[in-house]
Amino acid sequence: MVKHPFLQQARSFLVMNKMISYYLSLGCLCSCLVGLNFSSYAQQDSTQNPQNIQEDRKTQRIAKKAARRIRFLATLPANHNPKTASLLGLIPGGGQIYNRRFWKLPIVYGGFGALGYFTVSSYIEYGCFRRAYLETVDDDPNTNYVCPQDPNASEASLKIYRDNARSSSEIFVLGFVLFWGLTIVDAFVDAHLMHFDISDDLSMRLQPKLDYDISMQSIVPALGLSFQLRTKPSASLPIKFD
């Protein structure tokens, strides 16, 4: 039986094609295994290095902080400025609302409420003891007012109670005014520092240095303290102290 040359060439072509496919598959498999090996080693190195873990956590923390700050600044009015915050601060809590510091409102209104309550109570006591004292010393039997806080108080006691109540009321009024001013100052300072850079780029560096002393005509060691404050992301202001 004579084999046709065309059949022999086709058979050899099929065998060669199978061999090429086999070697290509084997090469792809080896490449995948080597790649998986390298990636596992790299992942193992990165996870086993504590410094890399700390740096990754620090980077993520800074990124989250920056994202929160950007979202917060986006809620502010378009022409946000300290002057407007101060003027709105004349209304209790207005400056804090303007600066979007809503968490401060319970402190502001709680302080105003407590100081207002004690101020009014002190003035009521002062009026009561004052009237009782005046009607006690006027020698008029028809005027005999008794203060409910202490009905059996003597003339000397009524005078002491009156003076103490007046002092307390004045102190509470002063505290009310000071607290009101503090809320205005808080609104102004908060609005002024709203756009300051508070990232980790703020730095302080303490380093030794050499200075030339003219009186001694010699070089003397010194200590230098360097601050770097940034008011805007694009500018920096170095301050040095010797």
Image (cartoon, rainbow, N blue to C red):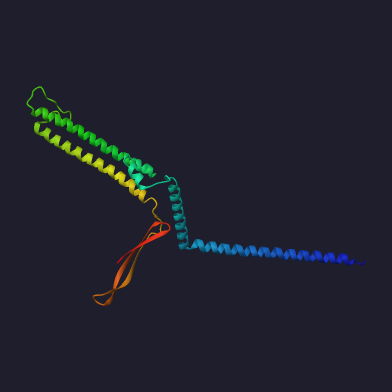
Name above or below for residue 218 compared with residue 86. below
Name above or below for residue 221 compared with residue 84. below
Q: Residue 13 is drawn in which quadrant?
A: bottom right
Residue 40 position in % (x across, y down): 56, 62
Q: Residue 142 is drawn in which quadrant?
A: top left
Q: Residue at x 62, y 65 (%)?
A: 34
Name above or below for residue 52 compared with residue 126. below
Left or right: 180 with respect to 133? right
Q: Residue at x 26, y 77 (%)?
A: 217
The residue positioned farthest toward the right in the image shown: 1
Q: Residue at x 68, y 65 (%)?
A: 27
The residue positioned farthest toward the bottom in the image shown: 217
Q: Residue at x 45, y 63 (%)?
A: 51
The residue positioned farthest toward the top in the image shown: 142
Closer to the camera in the image, 178 or 129: 178
Q: How many marks?
A: 0
Closer to the camera in the image, 45 or 100: 100
Closer to the camera in the image, 26 or 5: 5
Q: Residue 223 is drawn in which quadrant?
A: bottom left
Q: Quadrant of the C terminus?
A: bottom left
Residue 125 position in % (x across, y down): 19, 32
Residue 95 position in % (x across, y down): 35, 43
Q: Quadrant of the N terminus?
A: bottom right
Left or right: 208 with respect to 1? left
